[in-house]
Amino acid sequence: MLNKAVFLDRDGVINFDYGYVHQISNFDIIPGVFDAMKLLQDAGYKLIVITNQAGIARGLYNITDYENLTKHMVKLFARKNINFSGIYHCPHHPSNGIIKKLSINCNCRKPRTGMIQKAENDHKLNLQECWLVGDKLSDIQAGNTSKLAGNILVKSSHDNSKEQNNLNYFLAENLLDASRIIVG
């Protein structure tokens, strides 16, 4: 039997995006996120984070900083009985990286679909029953390319209005609003 999941961008969806969030002291959960995740989990969705972390390639922080923050996030949610089935990150940046081995044009950086494909294999997912929630059009593009059941763009500090797009998505105020769309 195949599983269903919600793919979640991290910064701007789960926590406030202050730009290259990598310190626990700057990891502030957006109001309503715990309720949203509980709603999705209770509806039978696996919760999978897929996050671009170009700050690693840019030398703004390192993999240890990212891993420490991820452990902190997992603990915060576990205290609320919310469990992530998977957390995937892309440390690359094709043009602005200062760490040579990470300054590549990879298949995992959204809008590419490498993280979604890896999660599909790791968790035996039926992508046609999966959703994606992001705060940038690059997130939505990855979901559209993967032919997910649906994609939701949450309002954020990113101005997506100027970008040309023919993407298929719902618009939500935040993750709680998005979770209500997903569970119907």
Image (tube, helix red, strand yellow):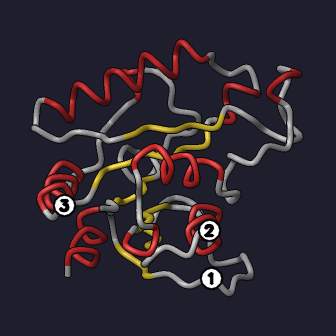
Dividing the picture into quadrants, the one containing residue 95 is top right
Camera-side residue: 156 or 87?
87
- Label 2 vs label 1, nearer the camera: 1
Residue displayed at 75% across by 48% down: 107
Camera-side residue: 52 or 130?
130
Which residue carries the number 2 mark? 137
Q: CA distance from mark 2 to mark 1?
A: 8 Å
- Contact between labelled residues 1 and 2, with CB atoms less than 8 Å apart: yes
Q: Mark 1 packing: few (<14 Cα in 10 Å), some, or many (20+)? A: few
Q: Secondary structure at mark 1?
A: loop
Camera-side residue: 169 or 59?
169
136 versus 150 height, above or below: above
Which residue carries the number 3 mark? 44
Which residue carries the number 1 mark? 167
First in sequence: mark 1 vs mark 3? 3
Q: What's under tag 2, amino acid-wise?
A: Leu
Q: CA distance from mark 3 to mark 2?
A: 26 Å
Q: Is residue 156 left or right of residue 45?
A: right
